[in-house]
Amino acid sequence: MNIILAIDRRFEEVLLVIFSTIMVSVIFLQVAMRVSGNSLSWSEELGRYCFIWLVYIGISYGVKKQRHIKVDVMLLLLKGKAKLLLAIIANLLFLVFSLYVVVNGYSIASQLLSFGQQSPALHIPMGLVYMATPVGFALTAIRLVQNLIVQIKMLIGKKELDVDDERDRMQKQEGEDES
């Protein structure tokens, strides 16, 4: 059970660190090689593909930390359970979108895998690069379901109501720092 909790807590972070490290290292190596008068044919391609995976895993991480981009004008006007209800509706809509992207992204990636198209320098199947989309959004859907479970528990009173957004948390922290 502890292993599952550790994976739940750190999965995206580990993947983001791995892809970031590979991307930065390869790009640094390419710059160093160009300064010395040489060039690597595969480094830019690997850096680009790591960045693509980084973006889609980052979406899931943003949802997990509840720091994804959103328009919060309506959230500023609402308090308590009304604010929570709007957040639940937004997460449900995002979940539907995520599932749509998973289904269609997987279809496209699997078609590319069946065609056998490969990247020019690394000869990686392009379907694996395109698989970043359904994998990232599948992780996002899992995180959205986790958030929805917590929010529904708050709505029905089985968990303490916590509807503070990032702005509210920052204001509280500033107030504590001044004290």
Image (spheres, rainbow, N blue to C red):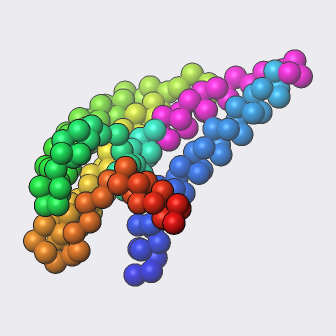
Left or right side of 68 for 24: right
Circle count: 0
Quadrant position of the N terminus in the picture:
bottom left
Viewer-side residue, 47 vs 177: 177
Q: Nearer the viewer, residue 146 or 179?
A: 179
Left or right: 27 with respect to 135?
right
Determine the residue located farthest toward the front in the rendered image.
179
Report the residue that reaches farthest toward the bottom: 1
Asked which quadrant contains residue 25, the reply is: top right
Classify residue 35 as left or right of residue 64: right
Magenta highlight range: 35-54
Magenta-drawn stretch contains 163: no
50, above or below 89, in the image: above
Q: Tell me residue 147's x, y (percent).
A: 26, 60
Q: Residue at x 67, y 38 (%)?
A: 24
Q: Residue at x 53, y 49 (%)?
A: 16
Q: Main secondary structure of the magenta part?
A: helix
Residue 58 occupies quadrant = top left
Which residue appears at 55% of the width and 38% of the height? 50
Residue 33 in percent (x, y) is at 82, 26
Residue 154 appears at what percent x and percent y?
18, 69
Residue 116 visible from this viewpoint: yes
Q: Nearer the viewer, residue 106 or 84?
A: 84
Does residue 152 sit above or below 28 in this rendering?
Answer: below
Q: Is residue 42 above or below residue 140?
A: above
Near-viewer residue (82 or 122):
82
Say which residue appears at 45% left-offset and 30% top-offset. Answer: 126
Whole-percent x and y of residue 121? 62, 24
Q: Can residue 149 be seen from the camera position used here?
A: no
Is 44 included in the stretch rendered in magenta? yes
